[in-house]
Image (cartoon, grey):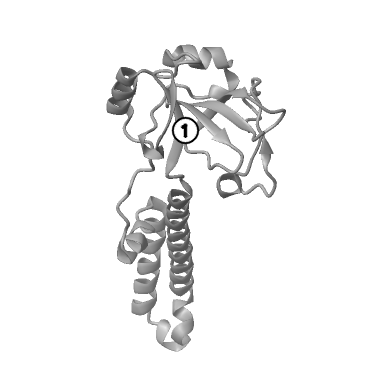
Amino acid sequence: SMSKVATVAHQVAIEAPHTLAPEKVLEHFGVKLDKGLTSKQVEENRAKYGSNELEEQEKKSLWELIWAQFEDLLVRILLLSALVSFALAFFDEKSGEEGWTAYVEPLVILLILGANAFVGVWQESNAEMALDALKKLQPDEASVLRDGNWKSIEAVGLVPGDLVEVKVGDRVPADMRMLKLNTTTIRIEQSQLTGESEPVAKEIELIDNHDPE
């Protein structure tokens, strides 16, 4: 038979659900393993915590990304020092004899700041693309236990405390704590989140807080 596991989506209030026994997690949400949340609990949790989806953040323009790299105090100090160094070199009587070499110091500082801005913009752009990629990985539907009945709902409709069933080949629809395992083992492919090349085994037992998987 297909591997499947009942899990419970957790909320911000539980900082490390993997360090708690399944019974404690169920108790926290006031949910029974054979019943799931009631319709009333679902509505209350949805009103309190919102939808199960990544927040849509307004994308910054290229100019805004570049400007953001110069908001750091240290960067501004270096920029100011480059301008002061340039002004001193320009008004120095010896600068005419030295030629462009008199401006080496401010030019080097400006080049470093430019490289720093380029790297910063590149990292910000990569972060936005990674977030978009994660949104595409989110499944459309999830199997959830509510009012004692299993039903298929849109994954975005999950709320903290929901009991979710995951089968072989399914995409995990939310951040969850495993409660019950119907096969000997289950391994999750999470390279998009952690960069790990191999699927990671998940367990029902408590996991040390210093080594969470």
Quadrant containing the C terminus is: top right
Which is nearer the eye, 23 or 70?
23
Residue 2 lies left or right of residue 91; in this view the side is right
Where residue 104 sits: x, y (%)?
Answer: 48, 76
Where residue 85 sits: x, y (%)?
Answer: 40, 69
Residue 76 appears in the rendering = yes
Q: Residue at x 41, y 26 (%)?
A: 160
Q: Is residue 68 above or below residue 44?
A: below
Q: Residues within 10 Å of mark 1 (few under 14, many from 20)?
A: many
Q: Residue at x 39, y 32 (%)?
A: 158
Quadrant of the rendered image containing residue 142:
top left
Where residue 77 sits: x, y (%)?
Answer: 38, 57
Q: Residue at x 46, y 45 (%)?
A: 138
Which is nearer the eye, 77 or 3?
3
Which is nearer the eye, 190 or 181?
181
Which is nearer the eye, 126 or 148?
148
Query: Of the residues shown, which amino acid type is indicated by label 1?
Result: Ser
Residue 92 lies left or right of residue 196; in this view the side is left
Number of marks present in the image shown: 1
Where residue 67 sits: x, y (%)?
Answer: 33, 61
Q: Is residue 62 above or below residue 183?
A: below
Tell me the residue that label 1 is attached to. Answer: 143
